[in-house]
Amino acid sequence: MLTVRFTVPAVPKHLVHRSGLLKRLTAGVEGPLTLVNGPAGSGKTVLAAHWVAEGTAPGPTAWLTVEPGDAPGAFWAYVLEALDRSGAVLPAGVGRPTRAEGVTRSFLVRLAEALAGSERPAVLVLDQFDTAEAPDVTEGLDFVLRHAAEGLRIVLTSRTDPLLPLHRYRAAGEIAEIRYDDLRFTDEDAEALLREHGLAVSDAGIGMLMERTEGWAAGVRLCALAMQSSADPEAFLRQFAADRTTIADYLLREVLDAQPGPAQDLLLRACVTDRIHPDLADTLTGRDDAARTLAGLARDNAFLEQAETSSWYRLHPLFAEVLRAHLRERRPGLEPRLRGRAARWFARTGRLPEAVAQAAACGDWQFASGQLVDNLAIGRLFTGLEADQLGRAFAEMPAGTPGAAPALVAAACRLPDQDLSGCEAGLRRADAYLTAESGPEARLTRAFVGVLAGRLADDLAATERAAADADHLLDELPGPLLAERPEIRALMLAGLGAAELGAGRLDRAETVLTAAVDACGAPGTEYPLCDALGSLALTELRGGRLRQAAEHAHAALAVAEQSALPPERRTGVAHLVLAGVATEHDDLAAARDHLDLATAAAGPRPERVAAVEAAVIGARLAASEGDGRAAIGALHAAGTAGAPPRPQVWALAELAAAESAVHLAHGDAAAALAALDGVDAAAAGRPEHAVARARALLAAGRADQAAEALADLPADDGLSAPVRARACLLRAEAAAADGAVEEARRRLAEALGLARPEELRRIFAESGPWVRRVLRQDPEPARVHGWLLSRSPAHAGASPAGGQPLLLEPLSPRETEVLRQAARMLSTAEIAAELFVSANTVKTHLKSVYRKLSVTRRSEAVHRAQDLGLL
């Protein structure tokens, strides 16, 4: 955080007290929005700073100077800091942005709600708001302002009208506007300013000045400064003509040239940086007089201001721009050398982003990239507020820049765009430079990028080799340096764990990803934490541990929300996991919602494991909706897309089982068997495949072969809960088909017991009418396992795709009406009278309702119908 941005600019020593405008500002903040609009130099900032200094605001006043290029995430991070520094108290639950490029709507909702609940309104002055280039900044500001009720008042200074819906604020009478015509100096204002500078000018001279400047405050102030050094102020006014000079010419001639030689030299050299520290200025000039010179320039209003309570100075942006152009013209070739010196000063003082930016600006790519490599800061390209700033700094680095550090940074910069070939090319170039004698920082950076590249390539062996190299190198590096870079270990563990998951090694993935979660927590590790939690949730889902999967998925979403990770930084894995959990719970509406969210956030190249799971879940949903062709197409696409050319064995087995289930949903047992027979022996040997084959064989009437397939399954301890429950349910179905009713009941009870901890409803919903027949004969298990009733509205009536409801036969319209009247607490006779039927007819309908809902009393029927969405 740059302190200077929160500092209210010092009120000029020579100040015109514009009481009318100050009163308008005080009145304006009684409403939500005040706009001070005018061109550069019209006095907007001076007026706002003077008003803040007067202390007439209704609550804590926060000041923030907006800078060009502020991305939404960075902007809101600065807004929160400004509010905090002003004394405004916000609850911790609001969260803070951790990525520069954006914030979520939920973050803005939390902020608006927190402000709305404040006892006193917070006043936020946003100076130079016209430099806010991102439309999302303005949209977010409008949202927060409209929903913060009386808790927020905003004062904007801007050269142009912001993209806020000003017409709406005007129509509602919720905006106070101070425009350029209001800001123009009057003759009295100009005279007062000249008098403050010790100048006595005739009325004719004042008129001439106002004619030339048209009341432009900066022009009047510039003239006053120049007139002080003029032997004949009136003659100066006669010679001054704004129409044949430019502000640049004037600033150079009358401001820069008016300074002593050492001050001119300092200004020209220091203009290459956005902010100036005396020690930095001494480094740029080679002298030791910067502290005294800068203080004098600021005191003399030479378009230089000092941030209060700090040693930093800042040039007026227009003056800095003019100085840089003049530097290039007057001293060609000096600017790159100055930027190089500045880069090394920033690096020496621990200001890495600024060091990189200065080195990149002068084309010193060796030094710029070396800052990331030698300081183990390569992870900051992927996580943290400065990630985008660092990425932009290297965007212009020429391809093939020699050296290990440029090659490593070039490789790392390709990863966010999923440019695997570009990353691998960079790594090959880095390997040509790296040797056993290279420093551990460079070799660890190579291993770090190798882990992330291996994950992107879906290459577990390469990922593990790089991770092993990294583990060895971590022991060679000083502990304090590693403690400053927690994102290194967190990102590598998250990458390795994801690669283990992609290879189907669930136990190993769980161990590594748990370690990745434990490695997070420090600032800057929010992204790897979200990533690791998402992968861990997917690991648990694939292992059949639905409760843990949902817990980790919700935790990942919570981290993303609290840290305001923008949508493009979210992989969608958490929503994918919740879609999978909802599918197993037979909550098809929720599954579809989560899958849509996961697909929208997946990006152009989702990881293989996520793509396979998305295809399987999508196929199940498409099949339930009667679209078998779309389901099969999605599964085939997932089996052939991306690299490597073929999925892992686990993926082949899962895709084949899903395709078989689609065919069974449409009554085609032969096609279901054909889909399973098309996989290789390794995939065919997996438990999921054996269970799917047994199910297809049963559907084909080949019960003996189904029993053989189930007999080949490993011991129960080696199977996931869904596989064990499905196998037990298939054995129950085979027994029911063979007429072994008691065996079917025993097996069904066992299956219900296995499914109960994770509430695996889907396997029963897909099993057909035999389950309902068995439970109708013995309704006790249905009462014991009330969780089994489907949460999906689709199963409350006729089920999709021509299937049958789980335990619920559809209620007839008359039965539904009888139940609705029963919910009104009417007696049997009253229901009969209401529906114009006999009491016996009502009793008959109620008995049918009890049977279909597996209940014995009227109150139970009403409650269960309400749970199922029937009432």
Image: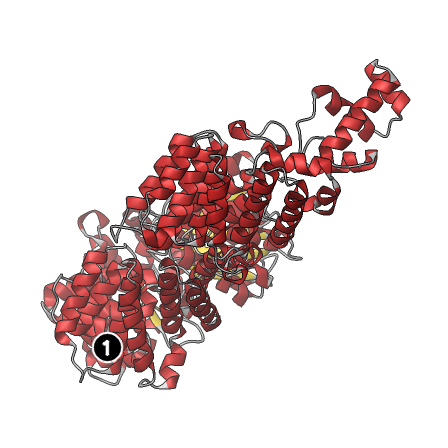
Q: Is residue 264 visible?
A: no
Residue found 44% across the figure and 59% down from its top: 535
In the image, 518 versus 86, the foreground residue is 518
Residue under the point 35% across and 60% down: 503
Judge from the rendering whether residue 160 lies leftward or rightward of residue 776; answer left or right. left
| Quadrant location, the C terminus | top right
Residue at the (31%, 50%) spot, across then down: 680
Q: Is residue 427 left or right of residue 453?
A: left
Would you say residue 98 is visible in this rendering? yes
- Kindly identify which residue carries mark 1: 442
Look at 49% across and 52% down and name the residue there.
Answer: 711
Residue 588 in the figure: left or right of residue 210: right
Which quadrant holds the N terminus? bottom left
- Mark 1 packing: few (<14 Cα in 10 Å), some, or many (20+)? many
Q: Give the x, y percent position of residue 322.
A: 21, 60
Q: Position of residue 77 (x, y in %)?
A: 45, 61
Q: Secondary structure at mark 1?
A: helix
Q: Amino acid at mark 1?
A: Ala
Up the image or down, 311 lies above or below 723; here it is below
Percent x, y of residue 554:
54, 55
Q: Quadrant of residue 222?
A: bottom left
Q: Residue 514, image x and y in percent? A: 47, 68
Q: Nearer the viewer, residue 698 or 805?
A: 698
